[in-house]
Image (cartoon, grey):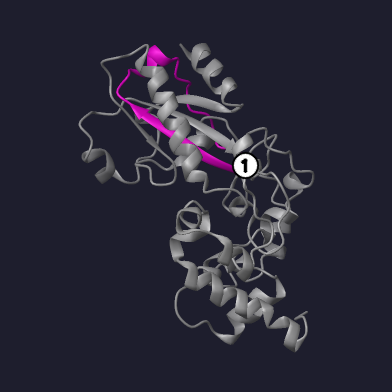
Amino acid sequence: MKNEIKEFFKREKIEYFNILAYKDVRETNPNIMARESFVPKSVIIYVVPYYGTETVNISRYAASYDYHLFIRGIGERLIDFLKGHFAHNSYHSYGDHSPIDERHAALIAGLGILGDNGLLINEKYGSYIFIGDVVTDIPPEKLGAAEPQEIDFCEHCGICKRSCPTKILSGEGCECLSAITQTKGELSDAQKALMVKYNTVWGCDECQRHCPHNRDPQITPIDFFHENTITNLTHGVLDSMTKEEFKKRAFSWRGEGILRRNLDIVSSRGESGKTE
């Protein structure tokens, strides 16, 4: 069965996946499974490469439509595929909001190593990947589940820590620049200065951009991440979006007001000079 699942993922242009027994993963949110009507026995875990283009002032993951839309779609297709073989079993697809620690599951499934920035680093696509999973009550032996592997780590070169704008990775700071760009309310002068210095209105890729594993990022083969891309977010781009279009974006969940505030902050560098 595992080979047939491999063929399914091949059609979806997903190269890295594995299957684990649910007992081997780390359940971090049991309340999610408690709401389901089945007892989980297996997890199909996979990684989705998303790097498609460089961006000017937003994180690379936000260039395309919201990746949750892709994971939702592939999860539905995978479940339909599995139902063709196991019609009487139960399934649920997740991406981010999962009952399990998806990063830990991907690590013990051998899909990558753990970076000092806390990110999963894949051997081919670096850290420009998302993690998705399908939980089912199919017994793991029927799916060809793998034994959990020891977790491997990066080389601890320290580049990600040195490149972190807020120094949170080295323990000297208390917040991430990505989190700052998503913070509601008034920002401090120091927070605004960081956004101006790194020219970001949404997210932060600095630790990833400098990581040796991302030195020559592999372009994703998945069409979804090449379509409808935004590389430079401006007031004009926001003005041109319909409400339906805006909702499809990864940056929409915080609301348009946050983005316009950030754009005003970053554009202020043209008045006061670029912060060094």
Q: Is residue 111 visible?
A: yes
Callout 1: few (<14), some (14-19), or many (20+) C-alpha neighbours within 10 Å? many
Up the image or down, 237 lies above or below 81; here it is below
Could you tell me which residue is drawn at 58 percent across and 49 percent down? 119
Q: Is residue 188 left or right of residue 230?
A: left
Could you tell me which residue is drawn at 66 percent across and 69 percent down? 165
Q: Is residue 210 magenta?
A: no
Q: Position of residue 3 (x, y in %)?
A: 53, 12
Residue matched to label 1: 225
Q: Position of residue 168 (x, y in %)?
A: 58, 67
- Secondary element under disc 1, as helix, strand or loop, is helix
Residue lying furthest bottom in this view? 272
Q: Is residue 124 left or right of residue 88?
A: right
In this view, the residue in front, 1 or 73, is 73
Locate residue 80: give its quadrant.
Answer: top left
Up the image or down, 65 lies above or below 173; here it is above
Locate residue 231: give its quadrant.
Answer: bottom right
Magenta segment = 129-152
Q: Is residue 213 left or right of residue 170?
A: right
Instruction: State the quadrant of the N terminus.
Output: top left
In this view, the residue in front, 151 or 33, is 33
Q: Position of residue 40 (x, y in %)?
A: 29, 29
Could you tell me which residue is drawn at 38 percent across and 40 percent down? 100
Locate residue 34: give its quadrant.
Answer: top left
Q: Is residue 187 left or right of residue 222?
A: left
Instruction: State the quadrant of the C terminus.
Output: bottom right
Up the image or down, 181 lies above or below 155; here it is below
Q: Is residue 158 visible?
A: no
Q: Is residue 147 magenta?
A: yes
| Amino acid type of the residue that numbered disc 1 sits on in the rendered structure | Phe
How many numbered markers are drawn?
Answer: 1
